[in-house]
Amino acid sequence: MEGDLFYEASYNESKSFSQQEVRSDHASGFTAAADNYMERGIDLNEQLVRNKPATFFMRVKGNTMTGAGIHDGDVVIVDRSVKPVSGRVIIAALNGEMLIRRLEKTFNRIRLLPETPKLSAIDIDPFNAEFSIWGVVTYVIHAP
């Protein structure tokens, strides 16, 4: 019994608790006024995914889109329900290979443009059965 402390403060500070762990309900029925302004955490699925069943995450391999800010190892969020219009970055399937390029559509011509001077544009025959637009890139997750 010699090592026990009998006299100590009942309040031991609240720095070790997060805001969500602090209880706000009291026997009097009133809650803290600040609880009305307490914010939730950020849910990246709510912020970045518009159509959950049609959205995919893909890791980029290569440096074909560095001019667009998409680098080797980045993760792109691809939405298959977004209409591919000229100027958007898309994922295309060409001859069994997946490519990330900028789409350029004119009246009778489709081109896939890289964002690097090391590669040239790919002209697509619209009647080629080996070409399809897989989805549109909506966001890029880039590690610093």
Image (cartoon, grey):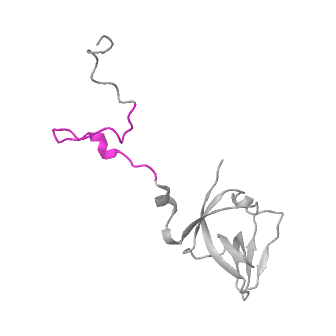
Image quadrant where residue 33 sits: top left
Q: Is residue 13 inside the magenta stretch?
A: no
Q: Is residue 23 inside the magenta stretch?
A: yes
Please give the name of the residue rendered at 29% of the width and 24% of the height, measured from the top-left corner: 11
Query: Which one is in front, 137 or 75?
Result: 75
Residue 127: percent from the left, percent from the top? 72, 89
Residue 13: percent from the left, percent from the top? 34, 26
Please give the name of the residue rendered at 66% of the width and 71% of the height, measured from the top-left corner: 91
Quadrant in the picture for the N terminus: top left
Residue 98: percent from the left, percent from the top? 70, 72
Above or below residue 99? Residue 13 is above
User: Residue placed farthest to the top in the image?
Assistant: 2
User: In this image, 20 relative to 32: left or right?
Assistant: right
Above or below residue 10? Residue 120 is below
User: Residue placed farthest to the bottom in the image?
Assistant: 127
| Magenta stretch, overall SS | loop
Image quadrant where residue 84 sits: bottom right
Please give the name of the residue rendered at 71% of the width and 81% of the height, measured from the top-left corner: 131
Magenta-drawn segment: 16-42
User: In this image, 47 relative to 142: left or right?
Assistant: left
Residue 130 in sight: yes
